[in-house]
Image (spheres, rainbow, N blue to C red):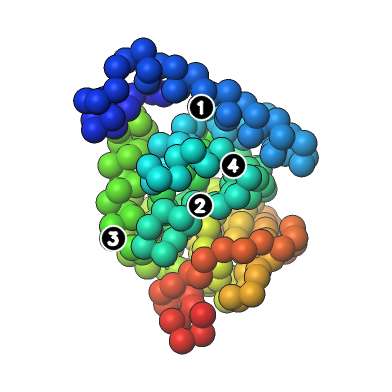
Amino acid sequence: MENEVPPEEAAETPPEDLAAAEQVYRALRERMVQEQLIARGIQDQRVLAAMRHVPRHRFVPAEYRHLAYADGPLPIGAGQTISQPYVVALMTQLLELQGPERVLEIGTGSGYQTAVLAELVAEVYTVEYQPILAEQAQERLQALGYRNVWFRQGDGSLGWQEHAPYDAVLVTAAAPDVPLPLREQTMLGGRLVLPVGGRWGQRLERWRHLENDGWLREHFGPVAFVPLRGQHGWQEDFW
Ligand code: SAH
């Protein structure tokens, strides 16, 4: 999987250089896992293995590829960003995934978080608002060989009712409040992880759907995401 390269690069670059580049990326990835994730307390071994494996450099625009394993978010076009590796790891860890789950992700973006999820669970359903990003992410993940991901372009603040309920739901854009449809589509015992708040910052929240149909709401510190749009998101005037 990691030796696949985009056709435009394959045409120009000799195979031995591509293999050498992949070696460098693998080393950078290991360093990212050690210094950005393990050092800051990410402990879920399956999450660490997934992030060692997914080629993050394939998810960022060519002009930022040298920064693919740096400790921050990066632009991915259409005014959106790929999240910082630590935030991806933390949110994924908070979902408490074991393997057999079906997960709903809102905000496909580059598809990087989607790929991390696809490494960890049986099925991933992902929704992206921006048509161009939705299309590119789908092509990218298919080229990388992921076969357990279903894509949809549209308003993810409404969830994806057709395949509900989900064991876990992850929102990677900032919501003014927890969208009701996403709560309704999280099964009993399931987890919903999302950033809640406005333009000047949000806090990471986990909502656990208890077996008695109540909710346990927990907070995990400040984060900074782009806005969730759509019916249960931010209107342009407010962000
Ligand atoms: N997880 C992504 C980061 C995405 S940034 C990655 O790893 O690259 C947040 C994404 O949420 C953006 O692509 C944005 O277009 C998308 N988004 C915003 N509102 C949305 C909505 N209502 N439904 C689906 N996607 C939405």
Question: Under 8 Å from ligand 1: the CB of mark 3?
Answer: no
Label 3: which secondary element:
helix
Q: In the rendered structure, which disc, 3 or 2, sits on the residue that comes first in sequence?
A: 2
- The residue wearing badge 4 is 70
Distance from Cα at disc 3 to Cα at disc 2? 19 Å
Q: Which three-letter amino acid code belongs to the residue tagged 1? A: Tyr
- The residue wearing badge 3 is 131
**Label 2 near label 3: C-beta < 8 Å?**
no
Q: Which three-letter amino acid code belongs to the residue tagged 3? A: Pro
Q: Which three-letter amino acid code belongs to the residue tagged 2? A: Leu
Q: How many marks?
A: 4
Q: Position of residue 204 (x, y in %)?
A: 67, 61
Residue located at (27% from left, 51% from top): 135
Q: In the rendered structure, which disc, 1 or 4, sits on the residue that comes first in sequence?
A: 1
Distance from Cα at disc 3 to Cα at disc 1? 29 Å
**Label 1 near label 3: C-beta < 8 Å?**
no
Image-quadrant location for residue 199: bottom right
Examine the rendering and report whether any part of residue 174 can be seen. yes
Distance from Cα at disc 1 to Cα at disc 2? 17 Å
Q: Nearer the viewer, residue 119 or 2?
A: 2
Q: In the rendered structure, which disc, 4 or 3, sits on the residue that comes first in sequence?
A: 4
Q: Which three-letter amino acid code belongs to the residue tagged 4? A: Ala
| Furthest-bottom residue in this view | 237
Residue located at (37% from left, 20% from top): 18
Q: Position of residue 84 (x, y in %)?
A: 59, 49
Mark identifier at residue 74? 2
Residue 222 vertical position relative to residue 151 in the rendered view, above or below = below
Q: Nearer the viewer, residue 239 or 141?
A: 239
- The residue wearing badge 1 is 25
Distance from Cα at disc 4 to Cα at disc 3? 27 Å
Question: Under 8 Å from ligand 1: the CB of mark 4?
Answer: no
